[in-house]
Amino acid sequence: MFKVGGKMFALSHLDAQPLQVSVKCDPEIALQLRAGYPAIAPGYHLNKRHWNTVTIDGSLPDQMLSEMLTDSYDLVVASLPKARRPA
């Protein structure tokens, strides 16, 4: 589990095969990503409206994965009270 300010922004079992990571996502964008990429599915055991689970199988560009993680982090940071946001 990866957290910022005490709130989760990514979840992964790093020893799993295939490797998967769940990331927070804007609900409209989440639907678009799921429709366009077989490796992206609704969040496994998470709120499926706000979370996507991404199978890292080489079908998505590394840059896209990086952007999804950054977006997830930014969404969680934006929801934090100012006192708990990283500097």
Image: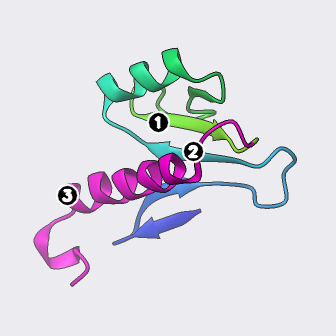
Q: CA distance from mark 1 to mark 2?
A: 7 Å
Q: Amino acid at mark 2?
A: Ser
Residue 5 image position (x, y, % from top left)? 33, 72
Which residue is denoted by mark 3 in the rendering?
Answer: 78
Q: Which residue does the image show at 53% across and 65% down from the upper left?
A: 2
Q: Is residue 85 inside the magenta stretch?
A: yes
Q: In 3D space, how far apart are the residues under numbered discs 1 and 3 (Cα atoms)?
A: 16 Å
For label 3, the SS is: helix
Q: Is residue 15 above or below residue 54?
A: below
Q: Secondary structure at mark 1?
A: strand
> Residue 4 location in percent, x, y?
39, 70
Q: Amino acid at mark 1?
A: Trp
Upstream in sequence: badge 1 or badge 2:
2
76 vs 62, left or right, is left
Residue 83 location, quadrant: bottom left
What span is colored magenta in the figure?
58-87
1 or 3: tag closer to the N-terminus: 1
In-front residue for pair 52/35:
35
Residue that numbered label 1 is attached to: 51
